Image (spheres, grey):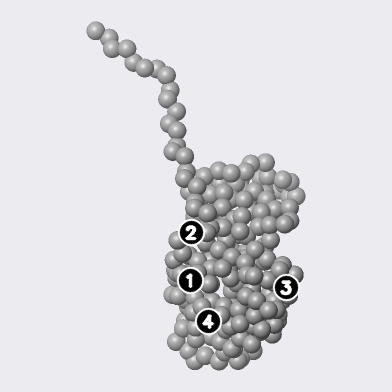
């Protein structure tokens, strides 16, 4: 007796991805509450949401920074950290602090917050946008009284914000590949054999993350 076989093709449906919690419900792995409030506000001014593309908060950049500081980068696990150190040396000589990036964040944020309170009348996250921008400019110029071993704080903050904005979403930032969509970056696509030589042409396909998600 012949047994009838089901010839139809059943397409498996991938389970819907659960959205991440709102940033105010995110369980931090490094920052304390006060540090988190500062980083949220600083990221919002470094890449604001008032332009044509997504802002740092839209892309959950603070989550990226929090995770990085809790990991190897924050611990300077792959850096030579045995000294000798000369924090006051010319910056062109490279990183000179005996502190790890995570320690620099932890020690620099309260110093900067005190400066904001004395200079602008309140903590950074409570200032209006124009005063926040002015405060960040002073921080960038080294005018806020940070000790020499903390002088790389602004450079770390800015670089980590950019990294979180453009990194693969698996690292916590660039939520839904919004930044990649905005700039037309294809992400982890692996087939570009027909593309060499086509300079200044817009790539027609949306980005793909390392995990295979598409935007």
Residue closest to the eye, 15 or 106: 106
CA distance separating discs 3 and 1: 24 Å
| Residue at image mark 2 | 26
Q: Mark 4–mark 1 contact, CB under 8 Å?
A: no
CA distance separating discs 2 and 4: 23 Å
Outermost residue toward the top in this view = 1
Residue closest to the eye, 113 or 205: 113
Q: Is residue 40 left or right of 47 when viewed as pictured?
A: left
Q: Is residue 134 visible to the viewer in this orientation of the structure?
A: yes
Circle nearer the N terminus (3, 4): 4
Residue 192, compared with residue 82, is above or below; it is above
Q: Which structural element holds mark 2?
A: loop
Circle nearer the N terminus (2, 4): 2
Circle nearer the N terminus (4, 1): 1
Q: Quadrant of residue 193?
A: top right
Residue 128 locus on image (x, y percent): 71, 68
| Residue at image mark 3 | 131
Question: Would you call the spot at circle 4 few (<14 residues within 10 Å), some (14-19), or many (20 or more)?
Answer: some
Q: Which mark is residue 107?
A: 4
Q: Residue at x 52, y 61 (%)?
A: 63
Q: Which structural element holds mark 3?
A: helix
Circle nearer the N terminus (2, 1): 2
Circle nearer the N terminus (2, 3): 2
Q: Which structural element holds mark 4?
A: helix
CA distance separating discs 3 and 4: 22 Å
Q: Residue at x 48, y 71 (%)?
A: 32
| Residue at image mark 1 | 32
Residue 171, compared with residue 18, is above or below; it is below
Q: Is residue 133 visible to the viewer in this orientation of the structure?
A: no
């Amino acid at each position: 007796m012949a047994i009838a076989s089901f010839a139809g093709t059943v397409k498996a449906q991938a389970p819907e991805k659960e959205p991440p919690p709102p940033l105010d419900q995110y369980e931090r792995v490094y920052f304390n509450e006060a540090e988190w409030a500062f980083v949220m506000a600083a990221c919002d001014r470094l890449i604001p949401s008032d332009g044509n593309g997504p802002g740092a908060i839209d892309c959950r950049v603070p989550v990226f920074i929090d995770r990085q500081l809790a990991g190897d980068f924050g611990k300077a696990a792959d850096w030579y950290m045995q000294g000798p150190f000369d924090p006051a040396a010319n910056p062109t000589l490279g990183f000179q602090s005996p502190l790890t990036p995570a320690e620099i964040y932890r020690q620099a944020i309260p110093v900067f917050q005190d400066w904001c309170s004395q200079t602008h009348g309140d903590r950074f996250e409570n200032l209006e946008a124009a005063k926040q921008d002015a405060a960040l400019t002073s921080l960038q110029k080294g005018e806020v009284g940070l000790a020499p071993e903390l002088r790389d704080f602004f450079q770390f903050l800015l670089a980590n914000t950019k990294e979180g904005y453009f990194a693969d979403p698996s690292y916590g930032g660039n939520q839904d590949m919004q930044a990649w969509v905005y700039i037309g970056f294809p992400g982890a696509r692996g087939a570009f054999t027909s593309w060499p030589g086509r300079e200044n042409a817009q790539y027609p396909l949306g980005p793909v993350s390392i995990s295979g998600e598409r935007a």
